[in-house]
Image: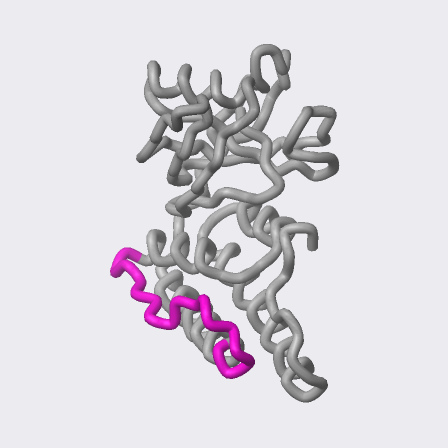
């Protein structure tokens, strides 16, 4: 298990700089096995050193690229997969471990494509507003998959929401509820941006601590 200060969702890429000895060992063990590990949000505490309070809902991550550096650190890229619930935390020696149970999404409804389209419209409008405010590191050319559930995952991964909101999205029963919640979050973010455009330039995106 790899507790982090951020939330991993399905289909999202996760770049990691591995420098703590315990997580160096975790990467080595994962590469000797099937390349997977669990990611959960640290609700309180720090990523470094332990002593944190962790969420009981997380995401399976699969390593897609791992490069060993000369000093023993690792540069790793993983991709998010299915959700799980933590049933029991084990020992943190040599690294955090837990017993988990898969928690699949509820089936999508026939109206999911419409919900995806609404959320996509809101996200594109929000990104365009942020670009007007001078945020220059945005992907405005968001191209979604044809399959609605995959497109829903893309929208969650691409949306500029903080870790607690992203955790709420992860916890939704299925893609329909996730798109409804995301649309509301994007509406709220758009209102904040409009207010900032009237009051003056500020950083429009939530920080990892929000």
Assess whether residue 136 is covered by the magenta stretch: yes
Of 64 and 76, nearer the camera is 76
| Number of numbered tags placed on the structure image | 0
Question: Which percent across, then down, holds residue 209?
Answer: 69, 51
> In the drawing, does residue 138 fall left or right of residue 1?
left
Of 125 and 178, nearer the camera is 125
Main secondary-structure element of the magenta-colored stretch? loop
Residue lying furthest left: 146
Report which quarter residue 121 is drawn in.
Answer: bottom left
Report which quarter residue 139 is drawn in.
Answer: bottom left
Assess whether residue 77 is covered by the magenta stretch: no
Give me the residue at 56% from left, 24% from top. Answer: 20
Which image quarter is the C terminus in? bottom right
> In the drawing, does residue 60 fall left or right of residue 185?
left
For the record, the magenta segment spans 131-147
Residue 205's place in the image compared with 47, above or below, is below
> In the drawing, does residue 150 fall left or right of residue 24?
left
Residue lying furthest bottom: 198
Residue 61's place in the image compared with 140, above or below, is above
Give me the residue at 38% from left, 38% from top. Answer: 77
Question: Which percent across, then down, holds residue 65?
Answer: 32, 34
Question: Which percent across, then down, holds residue 114?
Answer: 38, 69
Residue 164's place in the image compared with 197, above or below, is above
Question: Which percent across, then down, holds residue 193?
Answer: 62, 77
């Amino acid at each position: 298990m790899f507790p982090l200060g951020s939330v991993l969702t399905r289909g999202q890429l996760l770049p990691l700089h591995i420098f703590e000895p315990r997580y160096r060992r975790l990467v080595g063990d994962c590469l000797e096995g099937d390349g997977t590990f669990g990611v959960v949000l640290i609700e309180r505490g720090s990523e470094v050193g332990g002593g944190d309070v962790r969420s009981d809902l997380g995401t399976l991550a699969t390593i897609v690229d791992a490069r060993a550096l000369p000093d023993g650190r690792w540069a790793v890229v993983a991709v998010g997969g299915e959700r799980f619930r933590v049933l029991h935390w084990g020992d943190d020696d040599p690294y955090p471990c837990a017993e988990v149970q898969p928690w699949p999404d509820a089936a999508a409804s026939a109206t999911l494509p419409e919900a995806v389209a609404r959320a996509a419209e809101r996200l594109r409008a929000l990104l365009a507003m942020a670009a007007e405010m001078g945020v220059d590191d945005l992907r405005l050319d968001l191209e979604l998959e044809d399959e609605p559930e995959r497109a829903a995952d893309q929208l969650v991964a691409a949306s500029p929401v903080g870790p607690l909101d992203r955790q709420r999205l992860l916890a939704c029963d299925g893609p329909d509820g996730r798109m409804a919640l995301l649309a509301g979050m994007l509406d709220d973010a758009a209102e904040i941006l409009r207010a900032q455009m009237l009051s003056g330039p500020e950083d429009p995106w939530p920080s990892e601590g929000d």
